[in-house]
Amino acid sequence: MKDVAKHAKVSVSTVSYVLNNNGPVADDRRARILESMRVLNYEPNESARNLKRRSASAIGLVVPDLGNQFFALLAKGVERAASQQDVLVVLCNPETSEEAELSNARLLRSQRVDGVVYLSGFDESPASLIELTKIGPVVLVDERVPGINLPSVLSEARRGAREIASHVFDNGHKNVAVISGPTALWTSEQRLAGYREACAGAGLDPDKLKVVAGDYRMHSGAIIAEKLLSVSKAKRPTALLCANDLMAIGAIEYCKSAGLSVPEDVSIVGFDDIPIAGLLTPRLSTVRQPAEEMGFQAATLLINMIKVARGEEGVEKLPSQTLVPVEVVIRDSVCPPSKAK
């Protein structure tokens, strides 16, 4: 900045006013400063500028599996919100274990990010969450953790699960099985609760609903579908409620390999409505979550919390909890069991 000021024959404070757009500068001086910046190839030091402005300069994003289109879209929403406020996103993608999550939490802490948007794909995450709260604010997306009260952006998962399951029961299915998510995750519990409510609403005993936990990945959907469907036709479920689209896709792929037709032999539904869901054969009936919007709102909330904590002027505190609506999308993967071949 001193070099730019000397070249433009102005004071350093005048250069600062132009860079930060926060002070009166005559048009001719502004033009000289911008030309000097161009000639000297000057690039502002964003870390230093943000430190002086006490503004968020970087946030972390912990997301379990970018191979899942839902998480990829959510990350896109986080990046869009951050870029609008000139904030860098540091991505951590611990695909393997809780130990990897903890390691990434420590890495983010060492990188001096100002806060974190957090999604977990594992049954247990308190250790990594506690590590992350040492950094600054943490906003959960599509998740709650018992015993740790953190701001969050959630969807109406329970209602969505209830409505998609009701669609299956309304088509006459009685022998229905569930491929759920990891047992300790809030998302899994909410979706399973919705399935059980729909089961009770159909006059069936929800305690007799067969439930097998997967890990939200395609391979687990295929493995569990094989376990549930490799029985006699009389015992075989006529419908599978899958707690996300990837596991539903895995189940459909198993059915194709086993010579079972979807939906004539087995009806299958998912959850999330990732882009590929409408391109499958058959097209998947599912619950649409606005993944990108959820990511955008989570990052917006996090940056707002950082600014409020720093006492920045003119920043109005946002609500710590946001609930976004979901939409049931009916396509081609469900039909009445009476049509079975």
Image (cartoon, rainbow, N blue to C red):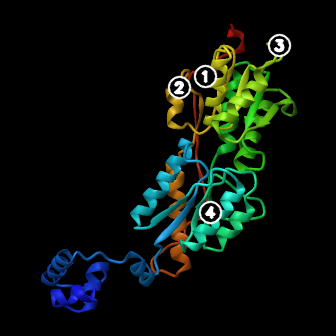
- The three-letter code of the residue at mark 4 reads Asn
Front tag of 2 and 4: 4
Q: Which mark is residue 333?
A: 1
Query: Image check: 12 left or right of 331?
Result: left
Q: Can residue 21 be seen in this view?
A: no
- On the image, numbered disc 2 is attached to which residue? 280
> Which of the two residues, 29 or 258, is positioned nearer the viewer here?
258
- The three-letter code of the residue at mark 2 reads Leu
- The three-letter code of the residue at mark 1 reads Ser
Identified at 21% across, 85% down, the residue is: 25
Residue 74, relative to residue 232: is it above or below?
below
Q: How far apart are marks 1 and 4 (CA)?
A: 39 Å
Along the polypeptide, which appears first: circle 2 or circle 4?
Answer: 4
Q: Distance between the residues labelled 2 and 4?
A: 35 Å
Q: Residue 104 carries which label?
A: 4
Q: How far apart are marks 3 and 4 (CA)?
A: 48 Å
Tag count in the figure?
4
Residue 217, relative to residue 155: is it above or below?
above
Front tag of 3 and 1: 3
Q: How many residues crowd around disc 4 within 10 Å: few (fewer than 14), some, or many (20 or more)?
A: many
Q: How many residues crowd around disc 3 within 10 Å: few (fewer than 14), some, or many (20 or more)?
A: few
- On the image, numbered disc 3 is attached to which residue? 234
Q: How far apart are marks 2 and 1 (CA)?
A: 10 Å
Quadrant showing the N terminus: bottom left
Residue 67, relative to residue 248: is it above or below?
below
Residue 33, relative to residue 241: is it above or below?
below
> Which of the two residues, 163 or 223, is positioned nearer the viewer here?
223
Identified at 29% across, 85% down, the residue is: 16
Identified at 87% across, 34% down, the residue is: 207
